[in-house]
Image (cartoon, rainbow, N blue to C red):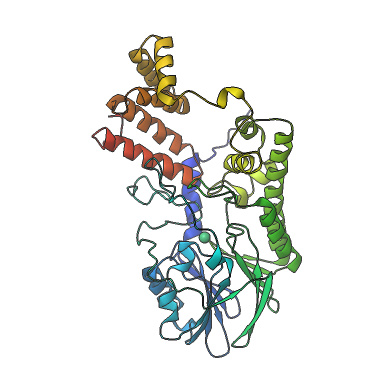
Amino acid sequence: MTHTIDLPSPSNELRVHSKNFRKQIVEVTRGVFVAIGYSASNVTLIQGRTGSIIVDTSANPVDAAAIVAAFGDRLVRPVHAIIYTHNHPDHSGGATVFAGDDAPEIWSHERLVTGEPELARGMRDGGDQFGIALPEDQFINAGIQRQYGRETPHTREGFLPPTRTFGGREHVLHIDGVDLHLLHTPGESEENTALWRPGPRVLLCGDDLYRSFPNLSPLRGVRLRPPEAWIASLDRMIALGPEHLVPGHMQPVHGTAEVTALLTIYRDAIRFVLEATVDGIRKGLTPDELVQQVRLPEEMARQPYLREYYGCVAWTVRGIYADRVGWFDGNPATMFPLAARARAERMEKMVGGRDTLLAHATEVLAQDDAQWAAELADLLLALDPACDQALCLKADALVLLAERQINAPARNYYLTVAATLRRRAGTEKPASC
Ligand SMILES: [Zn+2]
């Protein structure tokens, strides 16, 4: 007799993942507290002899005030120093609240100030990986955050620029009786700074590790985050032998063996994808072929910290390809492809008319072939960008694709584009319009 096991649907797995964003103050070790789930990212409080040190500042002054309240009398003023692990808005937007009237030193790596600004603003084609505008019943989470900018926008009004920076690989601080090693550990951002306290063996790793496959090549449109640098940074962290690991998102991890194993498999997963992709490039595979071939080995794919809630293996493969080989996949037919409309006109002619195309797209969607339905809808929209039926068909296809994702950015992006298409069709009805 065979037994079937009920595996959660992808969207249910993502829902279960939301438990990792529960609001809580965790005492990592004596005098070190982390506020989880109050904002898009964690804030860590390190108690000194006479006051406090704050690592990361949450997304905005509203979240920061909630965290100050939650820390309560554990946060002893004055705040002597604020340290940014990196510049992302969810980590750096609430500094004014923690600083108060204490005039703390604000520390970061110098690349936080001198780094290259991002070119794209994240929202293209009406899509948004954070799902900021999605209605509550469609939104699950933002992958490594419970939400990102939905409840309180990530304004920069609470940001305080660094007053002190360091430029090398390491800088040792002695603040209020606390020894802190700032380690430049580029990975999720070029300025990522890990904090190491040798005494209690606590490592704050910034965003170089979180409970998801790493976001090496984000959907929202930034350069590939260099995998070699990320691997080297994890190597440095492994060599420290931390007893407590505090990531920039979600729960800390305890125990030297467990922390070491986690840092190691995280590093190995990045290395695996990098090496398999480079190997495939050498063999002449195209990006479309590579994403079919490069998959994490089963024991890695099942690891909770390597599930693709936020980063995605296929996007990493494409990012590495574009970074190493450029845009051209090697096929001469893709050197100067037909414009979308010219291609659609030829397809229309080939199948015998637009109605046939529409009927076929509707039929394949009814058969759950959502990806193909979306691609056929694109042909119809290239012929007539205002075709209501094609707009709604594509929206329906994207909603189906969203439900099949554990990847929150993909889900959020599908659903926000679907909403945009329905608005263009003049209706916001949830089902097929
Ligand atoms: Zn973050």
Q: Quadrant of residue 85?
A: bottom right
Left or right: where does residue 264 sit relative to residue 205? right
Taking the spot 66% from the left edge, 37% from the top edge, the residue there is 294
Q: Quadrant of residue 69?
A: bottom left
Quadrant containing the N terminus is: top right
Left or right: where does residue 66 sit relative to residue 28? left
Image position of 363 with respect to 141: above or below = above
Image position of 432 with respect to 152: above or below = above
Instruction: Residue at the far left: name it.
Output: 426
Instruction: Residue at the far front: name it.
Output: 336
Taking the spot 72% from the left edge, 50% from the top edge, the residue there is 268
Quadrant containing the C terminus is: top left
- Name the spot of residue 372 as percent of width and height, x first: 46, 24
- Name the spot of residue 412 as percent of width and height, x first: 42, 45
Image position of 239 with respect to 119: above or below = below
- Name the spot of residue 213 as percent of width and height, x first: 60, 49
Instruction: Residue at the far top: name it.
Output: 352
Taking the spot 69% from the left edge, 58% from the top edge, the residue there is 263
Q: Nearer the viewer, residue 156 or 421?
A: 156
Q: Nearer the viewer, residue 162 or 332?
A: 332
- Name the spot of residue 395 as percent of width and height, x first: 36, 33
* Residue 430 shows in this picture: no
* Residue 164 shows in this picture: yes
Number of labelled discs? 0
Q: Nearer the viewer, residue 255 or 84?
A: 84
Instruction: Residue at the far bottom: name it.
Output: 50
